[in-house]
Image (cartoon, rainbow, N blue to C red):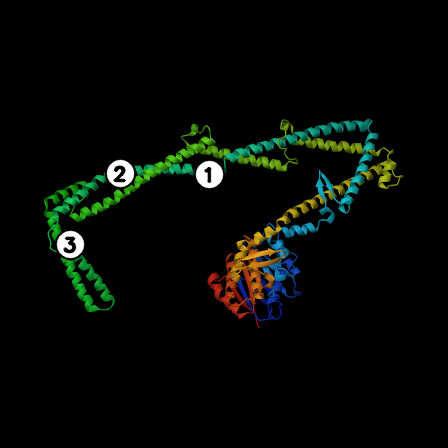
Amino acid sequence: MPVHITEISLDGLPPQPEIHLRPRRVNLIYGRNEHGKTRLVEFILSSLLRSSSKMTLRPVEAAGFVTVSGLPDAEETRFNPRSRSKLEDYLPAPDAGLPPQLARLLVVKGAENALQANTPGGLGRAALKDYLSNQGVIDRIQDRVPKTTRQAQVTDGRIVGPQNGDLKKRKENLDKLAMIDRLFAEIDAQLSDGPLGQLSARLVEVQEAAAGQKTARQQYVNRLAVDLARWQQESDALPGHEVLHLDADIREEQRLKEEIDRLTRSCREKMPLQADYHWLEAALQTYRAATIPQHDEPVWLYPVLAAVSVVATVLLAFFEFPWAALVTALAALLTGYLAYRRLRSDALANVIAPENRLIMAEFERRFHTRCSGITDLQMKKTSLEQEISLLKTQTELLKTGTERLQDLSREIEHRLTLWLPDWRSVAKNRQAALQILQDRRTFLENSITRVQIALKSSPVQPVPGGETARADEFNPQVLVDLEEESTRIKEKMEDLNRQKTILRQRICDVTGESVTRSLAELIPALQSMRMELEHNARAQTAEILAGIAVTQAAQELRAGEDTALQTALNNPVIREPIHALTGRYERVDLVEDRLDVSDSFQSFRLDELSTGAQEQVLLGLRIGMASRLFEGQPLFLILDDAFQHSDWLRRPAMVDEVLRLAQTGWQVFYLTMDDHLRDLFLEKTPPLLGDDFMAFTMKE
């Protein structure tokens, strides 16, 4: 659903009185300089876009709001300059995320067409990375990774890098943690007798049982992976689209059978007509041979003269020659009468002929209708010719359909043999065989989904080629109970350790506690210190590993950065608006950190073009990048005198391109002081959009 501005209401926008607008698809706002157009744009920017804070805006003192439709979970949403939430909080982010300069992409303020401030030509590599790829996001994330972490790497399961910064802090924490672990090992050795020894023995049993359950869990997951592979292989051998294709072929086979039966019946019914047709051909030859009277003039003379006279009458009447038309009309009546008398004499001669009487009698016997003469014979022959032609066509269709049915049946049987080795048990019922295949396909899909869900929820990953013999021993509840019991035993052992005082001094040395405190107070301090060190070490390790992963990903993405950006620039979505607006430039290339544009003959630096040409190229890039970034989610584009530097010959093409963008679902606001641009919009927009166009003039 498009995201459009549906209402703009504000008060106190000098020098304008209260403004209340109900924007349409294309909106033309006209006004002289210093009459509030740019202030209106700044009000909209401050109300809607958080990224507008990076643009140079004057303080907004006007009270009012801007209403936007098409946002998730709301039919319409109101914004104002003091709103905490902005449009960026509602827009669904594209794959590369919302660009930080979204306001500069969607809005041209005060004829400032540049998409990147302080950049030759108004656009460079940095902005392109934000608008055309996710590299800008990666760069900003990588900048948060400390320099020492970026220089580190993982080798043989260990983090290797300069021993300063975060890596140095992590090593210090790990050394302290190892020292505390050695202290606890000594405590365990000191307390191995009595209850501590029993608890230790039980803890070993519990841990072994838990290890057995974890092994069984691993093998259970391995078996799930084996089942998944087997079912996926069977699913690949029985693709869903092939089953649908088979269903369609079976339906087509049934349709062909019905069509062949219909054609067979129709041909059988029409076969006797061939004998009647052959009789009519012979009868017409005999009839004509016996009844051709002798005349001096040719048979076609009077009908042709009558037709010529009628045509001449119509033409003379059309060109207003009444007397000549009257003469030709009388000639048409005379020649028509002579033609009629000739035909009547021929008909009377035919009736008199004895052969004709026999033909008429046979005609009435065959067709059960009276024959008045040769005309009836010819009409009946013409009627039978249509039937005979239809019979021939149906015969050909019957032959073609039979061949097609045979080929289709063989193909269906081939596929059934391939997918159902015992399909002949249901050979007479194709639908039953198809149902078996559909049921098997449904079973495979459900089984694959169930196993995939189980694998995703498992804390361990399957081992390729791993064992599965103990998979049935796995019981999730038993594993939870064993882990809970292990935790309880450890807690009891820690309670016993607190009763010992032999290690008090060493614990005090590590913790810095007073030796006057009891062991019950010192051991928790040591444990707390260990937990804190372990927590810090884990957090530091996770942060360093994440930094290494981000750095590696950024390096991999950066390796193809130029190619990715150039590919995006070559996209027709970006190239076509540029060519449409400039009428000349067909290509944009990224050269180091600048942009070059090319026509059919040579290339030019964007920053060396004229102001009007730069304006056209940047507007084309703006339209193309916005369309590409928000594909399937049209937004709005606000242009404040974006064409004012363009020559008058290029302006119509620029207006046409903006209207083309509006026809794809984008909402366009164009603010101008230029009468020519105003008139172009007033001329071109209504024929394309009808009532979906608003024109507003700022008050003087």
**Residue 47, quarter of the rendered image:** bottom right
User: Of 653 and 336, which appears nearest the observer?
Assistant: 653
Percent x, y of residue 654: 52, 63
Label 2 neighbour load within 10 Å: few <14, some 14-19, many 20+: few
- Local secondary structure at mark 2: helix
Residue 269 bears which disc, if any?
2
- Local secondary structure at mark 1: helix
**Residue drawn 37% across the image and 34% down it:** 406
Percent x, y of residue 364: 16, 42
Q: Which residue is mark 3?
A: 299
Residue 469 drawn above or below residue 335: above
CA separation in Å, label 3 and label 1: 67 Å
Residue 244 bears which disc, if any?
1
**Residue 461, quarter of the rendered image:** top right
Q: Is residue 375 left or right of residue 252?
A: left
Residue 224 drawn above or below residue 73: above
Label 3 neighbour load within 10 Å: few <14, some 14-19, many 20+: few
Percent x, y of residue 238: 50, 35
